[in-house]
Image: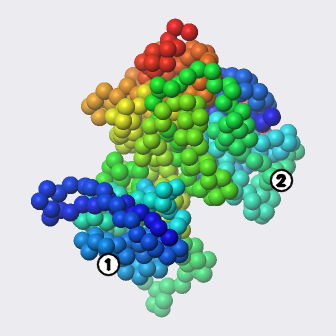
Amino acid sequence: MDVTVKVKRYDPDAARPQVEWQEYPISIDENATVLDALIMIREEVDGTLSLRCSCRSAICGSCAMRINGHAGLACKTKASDSMDANGTIVVEPAGVMPTVKDLVVNFDLFWKKIEEVEPYLKPEVPEPEAEYIASNESMLHLSGVTACIMCGACVSDCTVLEVDPTFLGPAALAKAYRFTADPRDGDANGVSRDRLAKLGMPSGMWDCTRCNECVQACPKGVAPMDRIMALREQAMEVGFGNTNGARHAEAFTESVGHSGRLDELRLPVQSVGITNIPALLGFMPVGWRALTHGKLPPLVHKNVEDVDTIRRLFRKLNNS
Amino acid sequence: MKYAFYPGCVSQGGAPELYPAAKLICQRLGIELEEIRAWTCCGAGVMQEKNQLFGDTLNARTMAKAEQLGMTIMTICSTCQGVMGQANQRMQNPEYLAEINSHLAEEGLEYKGTAEIKHLLWILIEDYGLENLTPHITRSLGNLRIAPFYGCYIVRPTEALGIEEHPERQTSLETLIETLGAILIDFAGKTRCCGFPILTINEKNSMAMVGKHTSEVKDLGADAMVTPCPLCHLNLDGFQPKAAKQAQRAIDMPILHLPQLIGLAMGISPAELGLKKHIVSTAPLELKLGAGSR
């Protein structure tokens, strides 16, 4: 099978270091992976091409990179599935993290964030005399998130990290959930209040945009974003409602539960908090522009027909 | 060709130009719409954070009504499409569906799990057919350079969007732009997040996303960006002046709703399509189109 692998290259030791694209036309087996193709290039065509890889079985997490614009493991991606109509596969280093050389990126940012969430059990009650007993159910639940192989694909494609390197990011937040959801962590009921308080600070769980990039990129089904949503639920459950994010979710649900549809005029006010004068003033130019263009949401929010049914459902399910 | 129409809150709230524009082009194309009676908000993923069961029950209620009508649901919002698609996917679990139906029973409704939910974008390509759309294109968009912007929920997660059976959905917006006769300005940011969901949580990041995408297509020479998502529109258009201020540069990138671009190609006037309601002026685009005086 003939294929052209187009690789984004960067050599810091070059006389004038710059990013450039290089195309490698090669012939590979029908069943070859993108990693097989890259290894063939390195061994038979161009020994200067740098990449990381080890297990070739989607276990070690070394070969995460962008293939046709999206992060994934090169060893888990079939070349035949990745070619465009002209037989080209575009390969780039992972995003967000700085490139060291060619397809190799510097993972310092990734590890720093994992470290920040204190990835170890922190029980607040005295240790039991014998072993900790955790239910099978709770451990099975955690097996989904412990499947993480730290490949960095989620971090590479995170839409928030791209604009804000202070965000904890999908890998670290999923790792944090692995502990907040562990019955052995936190107080006697397994509630990790301190962790949830810290994770609820700016740059934490509420900064995720819910864009699903990390869910799509993760080669192991960890679904980091879903874990971030679970963290938010845990935080609201234990009473950390005093954040813009929690107020936003609360006010949104209340609005729909009360009228059947979203009251778009009140939602931003309730999200930032009615006493948050600077934030409210910040909305004014936007509100003014909307008003003068005839598109301010209705001042009096209308209820849907059958609103009593919606309210009844809301009362019944609100605390479920 | 008739659909159970689900307009979504934003098309009648923060982006009120979308609802009439969508109805107008459907009428001209001969696509009949029956609005689902007393439809409720899909939850936009936000309500699902707080109470997924409540959100899914409301969506099941809407879907049950479409089942009764015996029609496919038509959405005009990427977020509604994704959120309802995900809810529908969860409800394929019979136990969960039974639980939800126990709550719907009071209203005499039952959801059987058979609803099909399709965005107007997909309907035009898969059901209506581009060959049937082409005869309606009466105004040349030939000199307009248009960049696509999908909105996260219509591209991810792929399992809830039928991408496996319909891989063409992944390039549907580009296909439509080219079918309408405009010049496609492709860019890597087209499937990224507009930042709207964190607007009230981390405005700086949200504005950085708006600034990044709109500047990128500006620098590629686009005349406008088109989106099938009114939430993206709210942020990319309504908050673009703020994003430009933060980015310390001029951007002035007009953002069109999908039905507006289609309507322009069908010869409908910019005023009828609600372009005057946009925050970023569409005047340069109209001038280039030669439609300014119509």
Q: Secondary structure at mark 2?
A: loop
Of residue B1 and residue B19, the one placed in the foreground of this image is B1
Please state the horizontal and vertical placement of residue B40, each as a whole percent of the image.
70, 38
As drawn, is A1 to the left or to the right of A161? right
Decide if residue A239 is in sight here: no
Q: What amino acid is found at the position of numbered circle 1 in the picture?
A: Glu
Task: Determine which residue is flagged by label 2.
Answer: B112
**Vertical placement of residue A302 versus B163, above or below:** above
| Residue in the picture at 14% in, 64% down | A13
**Vertical placement of residue A233 versus A29, above or below:** above
Of residue B197 and residue A27, the one placed in the foreground of this image is A27
Q: Residue at the top extreme?
A: B293
Q: CA distance from mark 2 to mark 1?
A: 57 Å
- Of the two numbered discs 2 and 1 in the rendering, the one whose residue sits closer to the viewer: 1
Instruction: Tell me which chain the residue with mark 2 is part of.
Output: B
Specify the quadrant of the image occupied by residue A41: bottom left
Quarter placement of the C terminus of chain B: top right
Task: Determine which residue is flagged by label 1.
Answer: A43
As drawn, is B20 to the left or to the right of A291? right
Of residue A319 and residue A218, the one placed in the foreground of this image is A218
Of residue A270 and residue A1, the one placed in the foreground of this image is A1
Quarter placement of the N terminus of chain B: top right
| Residue in the picture at 30% in, 53% down | A165
Please state the horizontal and vertical placement of residue A67, each as a whole percent of the image.
43, 61
Q: Secondary structure at mark 1?
A: helix
